[in-house]
Amino acid sequence: MWKTRTSCWTILAANRTQSECQFIRALYSGVLLVFICVACSDNQPEEFQFWQAGSTMGTTFSVKIPVLPQTVDEQHLKQEIDEILIGVNQQMSTYLVDSELSKINRRHVTDWLPISQQLRAVLSEALEISRLSSGAFDVTIGPLVNLWGFGPGEAQRTIPNDSEIQALLGKIGYENLLIRVDPPALRKKMPSLFIDLSSLAKGYAVDLVARYLDAVDIHNYLVEIGGELRAKGKKRDGRLWRVAIEKPESDKRVTEQVLELNDIAVATSGDYRNYFEQEGVRYSHMLDPKSGRPITHNLVSVTVLSDTTMHADALATAFMVMGPERGLQLAEREGIPALFISKAEQGFSKSQTSMFSLLTQ
């Protein structure tokens, strides 16, 4: 199912509006810029009977299908995909004032609040990863992200003082969020608790699109949103899908490793493109919910393989916050396929779990 290749895939750059760039800066310490390449010189549009691309959730998306079944209408398929993406945005966005999540964030109460099944599913996943990572992953960290100037609006590149950080640390914490399955509802132990699902929503949207394609008997596809992706089946020429993990260099784009994929999800998180510097010190957008400060370890990129893109997306963020030793230990213990790239005295060093080695040999 997996093989490594030496060929390189180039990254597609896309122009973004100012509002989209603001959205990207506000993503909680997950994938602000992605490190999975999804284009190749031998992967031109004419090789796909169906190719849909556009903007969503502050980034770009694409859906590539080699051959459509005769029972599937192309225009109807495009409409259904658009509606799925719009629906996720309408539920999970913190930028749309009328989204389901925005309305919940404005409800400063501790009562049980009814929520959709979709929002319940994403929140349940978030809490699972939070517990697994002992709080390294936390969807309530948004106020700290804003304090450090990585939130929406014009970036304020100033270093907060200790009192400001401590004040906000008392207002976050995944332990203050409770989820009820039936009927779906959530409860905030602290009325002002703010939830940001940017670190899972893209992955969840990829999974929903893939699930829909499966339901209409499309079994060969590549679905990608902002670099988080799911691949299934093969291309028209019978070859497996290929994606490249980028070498974590801030000033250029170089391929580190290329994978061949079939029926798997991939997500990558890194800290080397979204940061600011003051007095020779680099401050990453990747914040530790425990300290309220940017991470300081030498881990710069984590790639995770999983059955679902949402799961891979959240785990990659959690491992980035945990660092190379703790993250690798947890991934190995849980049997998670993961690749860790760290800064070294000379370039970079790679570590990977035994499951990642097994799947990519």
Image (spheres, grey):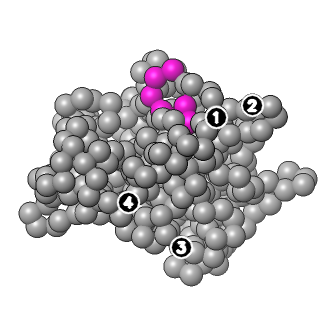
Numbered circles on residues, count:
4
Tell me the crowding category of disc 3: few under 14, some 14 to 19, or many 20 or more residues within 10 angstroms, Cα based: many
- Answer with left or right where residue 209 lies relative to residue 143: left
Q: Earlier in the sequence, mark 4 or mark 2?
A: 4
Image height check: is 240 above or below 192? below
Q: Earlier in the sequence, mark 3 or mark 4?
A: 4
Marks 2,3: beta carbons within 8 A: no
Marks 3,4: beta carbons within 8 A: no
Is most of the magenta stretch helix, strand or loop? loop
Q: CA distance from mark 3 to mark 4?
A: 23 Å
Question: Residue 25 placed where, x, y %?
Answer: 51, 32
The residue tagged 2 is: 278
Residue name at image x 42 percent, y 70 percent: 131
* Viewer-nearest of discs 3 and 4: 4
Question: Residue 307 placed where, x, y %?
Answer: 41, 66
Residue name at image x 25 percent, y 48 percent: 191
Q: Earlier in the sequence, mark 4 or mark 1?
A: 1
The quarter holding residue 17 reads: top left
View extreme (left): residue: 183
Whether 91 is among the magenta residues is no
Tell me the magenta residue range.
148-154
Whether 153 is among the magenta residues is yes
Q: CA distance from mark 4 to mark 1?
A: 25 Å
Q: CA distance from mark 4 to mark 2?
A: 31 Å
Marks 2,1: beta carbons within 8 A: yes
The residue tagged 3 is: 336
The residue tagged 1 is: 159
Q: CA distance from mark 2 to mark 3?
A: 36 Å
Q: Secondary structure at mark 3?
A: loop
